[in-house]
Amino acid sequence: MNSSHQHDYESDNALEKAIWDDPALLAALELVDAQQNEQLEQAKKRRRLAQYSWGGGAVAACFAIFMWTLMPVNEEPPISSSDLVAVQQFTSGKAQQVNLSDGTQVAMNVNTQLEFSENSHARKATLANGEAYFSVHRDESRPFTIDTGNATIEVLGTAFNVDKTLRETLVDVFHGKVSVTSLDGTKHVELVKGQRARVSDSTIQVLQFNASQPDWQQGWLDLDNVSINDALFQLNRYSEKPVVLSNVPSDIHVSGRFAVDDILGAAKLIAQLNALNVNQYPDSIELSKKAEN
């Protein structure tokens, strides 16, 4: 190395050493390093916070879904007191008067079964067995219906008698107006005072009658061309010993007015009109076909 180049090399080393030995420069470099390290740490913290926030949100969402699955499905709102249903049931072994919760009065014949329910919208009675005279409390906002199985009767306020027989329903109107519909809904009539409806599953026959009160309340049973089976069904409401048939044709029909306190006399009259025998037993009264000569 010539003397010129050696001099340049030594000068450069001396300058570099002087620069790095300068305290002001070293302080500036340390400040830059500290700022870079601080920025790096803040970036790491932001990444960790983002990861935590996402994970916490996912946990919160899962918890919310879990709590939702525990909530009751289709929970109904509480029923207001005006919609609570009142239910009454009556069974009569003998004729009696009962009062329904809506103010309606019902005279029940012997061996009658009646159920009544009401709410703020409607009133409904079900006549499962027997016969009853209704004096319905008028309430135009709540129609009063009676279900007998093969007929539906609807009123607002009136007085009428309903008799559920073996295969029919008889409706006699004593005051006001009554709507009657057959079981299959194909027949519908409106009855007024003095009209009677005989309702089967699909037919309604309207007749006229003249009475100030139901016949049963006067001690009578009126039968108008009913089957002999139906006649005995109605007579047996009043009998301690049932009237039964033995070898008697079912196509016999009965008409007449019979005293309900003399079932044996009624059985004898039916036997006389239809050429039948009457036999009394300890547990029954039997109607049988007469032997041919």
Image (cartoon, grey):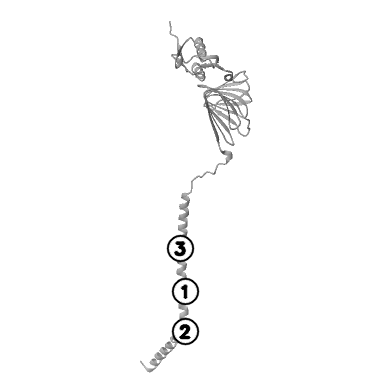
Which sits earlier in the primary sequence, circle 2 or circle 1? 2
- Binning the other alpha carbons within 10 Å of mark 3 as few (below 14), some (14 to 19) or many (20 upward) gives few
Residue 252 % position (x, y): 49, 14
Image quadrant holding the N terminus, namely bottom left
- Binning the other alpha carbons within 10 Å of mark 1 as few (below 14), some (14 to 19) or many (20 upward) gives few
Residue 11 % position (x, y): 42, 91
Q: Nearer the viewer, mark 3 or mark 2?
A: 3
Give the residue number, with chain letter if any, for mark 1.
38
Residue 38 visible in the picture: yes
Image quadrant holding the C terminus, namely top left
Which sits earlier in the primary sequence, circle 3 or circle 1? 1
Give the residue number, with chain letter if any, for mark 2.
25
* Residues marked 2 and 1 touching at CB (< 8 Å): no
Residue placed at 59% from the left, 39% from the top?
82
Farthest-out residue, front: 282
Q: Secondary structure at mark 2?
A: helix
- Binning the other alpha carbons within 10 Å of mark 2 as few (below 14), some (14 to 19) or many (20 upward) gives few
From mark 3 to mark 1, how far is it between C-alphas? 21 Å
Residue placed at 46% from the left, 69% from the top?
43
In this rendering, is residue 29 above or below 107?
Answer: below
Q: Nearer the viewer, mark 2 or mark 1?
A: 1
Give the residue number, with chain letter if any, for mark 3.
52
Q: What is the count of numbered marks? A: 3
Of the residues shown, which amino acid type is indicated by label 2? Leu
Residue 118 % position (x, y): 57, 34
Of the residues shown, which amino acid type is indicated by label 1? Glu
Residue 274 badge: none
Residue 46 % position (x, y): 47, 67
